[in-house]
Image (cartoon, helix red, strand yellow):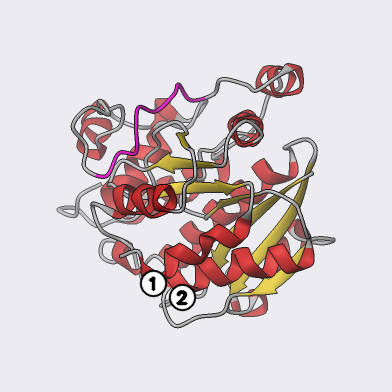
Amino acid sequence: MTVLLVMAKAPVPGAVKTRLCPPASHVQAARIAAAALLDSLDAVRATPGVTPVLALSGRLTDAEEAAELAAAVAGWQTLPQRGTDLGHRLANAHADVADAYPGRPVLQIGMDTPQLTPAQLDAAVHRLALTDAVLGPALDGGWWALGLRDPRHAAVLAAVPMSTALTGHHTTAALREQGLRVDSLPLLQDVDEWADALAVAASTPGDASAWSIDVTAAGRPGQAAAGLPGQPGQPGQPGQPGGQEAAHLEARPVRHGRRFARQVATVRRSLTPGIPR
């Protein structure tokens, strides 16, 4: 059974999503982060046949939406993140899961893609069963998911420059240098800046009607993958299930991304005239 590992920061004002400020305040940014994390946890919880694990930086008791977050991870194993930078924290989280769940493959995501569906996660799990590693490229050149049949290979992440336009490229190269076959997952947009938040919220099914076309264009959703820096191979199509279970999930009414979209809309409505909405 695959371990589905969520890397997350406790949504504490001033500690998360600071690149949303301005226009958001630190409290508003933390509430957006909490909504993104809750949506991500919902998607993991609805993914069949996986063991959910949370690798956490900070304390949920200090976070916005602390009670709801605590309820969402009730029964999950929670591991503290270890390391001085993101690369080391990622490597250590995979190593800790390898110790706790020997012999299990690991699919790791973060909290920056609240639009993720259970069917997309299920498809990634199925893809990992057929190869050594999978990587989900992000629109900014980074990545939103990493799956490893042997999670100890994540040790290479400690030497990969993170949060750059070439992070995805360097991650793929580092894994292939270990002799691993690396397959690509669908290209997704993650949430780093305010324009990203607007674009991802606008793309959430059932909520897009609340967003204007000009906001969607400014957020750059739907850009072609060709020519993007750091793209590890050709991405597949999002939402394609990896078997009958995933097809069943895709047919269900899944409320993926709804908390995030509502929270971004709330902040957007609060902005004073002249600030980009």
Looking at the rendering, which quadrant does residue 15 occupy? bottom left
The stretch of residues the image draws in magenta is: 230-238
In this view, the residue in front, 108 or 151, is 151
Depicted 87 relative to depicted 255: above or below:
below
Residue 11 seen in this snapshot: no
Q: Residue furthest left?
A: 274
Mark 1 touching mark 2, by CB under 8 A?
Answer: yes
- The picture places residue 83, in percent across and down from the top left corner, at 50, 80
Residue bearing mark 2: 13
Residue that mark 1 sits on = 26
Q: Amino acid at mark 1?
A: His
Q: Main secondary structure of the magenta part?
A: loop
Rate crowding at label 2 as few (under 14), some (14 to 19) or many (20 or more) other CA atoms within 10 Å: some
Q: Residue, x 21% and y 37% (percent of image)? A: 228
Q: Is residue 276 left or right of residue 232?
A: left
Q: Nearer the viewer, residue 231 or 275?
A: 231
Total marks placed:
2
Q: Which residue is at a point 48% across and 46% down the rendered structure image?
A: 113
| In the image, residue 68 above or below residue 188 | below
Q: Is residue 76 left or right of 82 when viewed as pictured? A: right
- Disc 1 is placed on an element classified as helix
